[in-house]
Image (cartoon, rainbow, N blue to C red):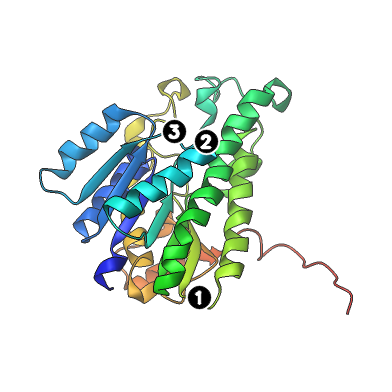
Amino acid sequence: MAKQQQVALVTGGGRGIGRAMVLGLLQHGFHVAAVDRDEAPLAELAALAGPGAALLTLARDIARPETCAAVVASVRERLGGICVLVNNAGVGQGSIRPDNWRRPIRFWEVSPEDWRRFAAVNVEAIHTLSSAAVPDMLAAKWGRIINVTTSLGTMLRGGYVPYGPTKASAEALTGVMAEDLAGTGVTANVLVPGGVTNTTLVPDDAGFDRAAMLQPAIMVPPLLWLVSAAADAVNGQRFLAAGWDSALPVAEAATQAGAPVGWKSIATLPIVPR
């Protein structure tokens, strides 16, 4: 990869899955910009990365489109053109009701304000950030857009409005991105943990043993493969980190953990007049 192609932007990068992916990319030689809404987790991330790490931290709320554009502009100015964009930031059900696992939130209980907040972060920010970052990728004829959505069961689970539908929208958006980017050298794919993961999106009130959850670090091996030259032809796919077997050669691990993005394997295509 050329030197100018070594800049990655990770949203929600201060904690959980985002933090694990930022540290993985840094160890892999990338210059990384980590965006998070809060300063404290970014300070913790910087301490973990250590002095001299090629890390830029930005405390920004990407729920506003103008902030997304400003984030990309700031990264471009300070680090260079972005070649890897990991849209990881998300708003979860626990932000509405911390004990939502025991007392599910029915769709009629969700306020318009909550719906708009979830949509702004879980879907709209992906589109805005990707639209702002992709010109650099297209110019370089190489780039990766990696969207963290969720498992199909979570998209459809009762009590999971607005999280499930907004993540389903992000999944569909990724499929369209992949089609639009075909043949450009830039790809769009989905990477998800594959189950309940030990992050702040799962409140303590959920009652789970955090040691029994999937751990954020499982996202790193498939991520590093996706940003490598070995995945140049991989576009419009979704990967379950829980199904990634690092004991296998990476090509076999990817085949085992991957599937088409969205619902292509189960849906029928529309009839189009000739």
Disc 1: which residue = 184
230 in relation to 267, above or below: below
* Picture quadrant of residue 97: top right
In contact (CB < 8 Å): disc 2 and disc 1: no
Q: Would you say the residues marked 2 and 3 are in contact, meaning their CB atoms lie under 8 Å apart?
A: yes
- Name which of mark 1 and mark 3 comes first in the sequence: 3
Residue nearest the viewer, comparing 5 with 69: 69
Q: Is residue 149 visible?
A: no
Seen at 23% across and 38% down, the residue is 45
Per the image, label 1 sits on a secondary structure element best described as loop
x and y, in percent, of residue 151 in the image: 55, 48
**Amino acid carrying mark 2 in the image:** Arg
Q: Quadrant of residue 227?
A: bottom left
Q: Where does residue 270 sit, x and y in percent of width and height?
A: 81, 67
As displayed, is residue 221 above or below residue 187? above
Disc 3 crowd rating (10 Å Cα; few below 14, some 14-19, many 20+) is some
Which is nearer the eye, 151 or 23?
A: 23
Question: Residue at 27% of width from left, 51% of height from top?
Answer: 78
According to the image, label 3 marks what residue? 61
**Amino acid at dot 3:** Asp
Residue depicted at 40% across the width and 44% down the height: 71
Q: Which residue carries the number 2 mark?
A: 64
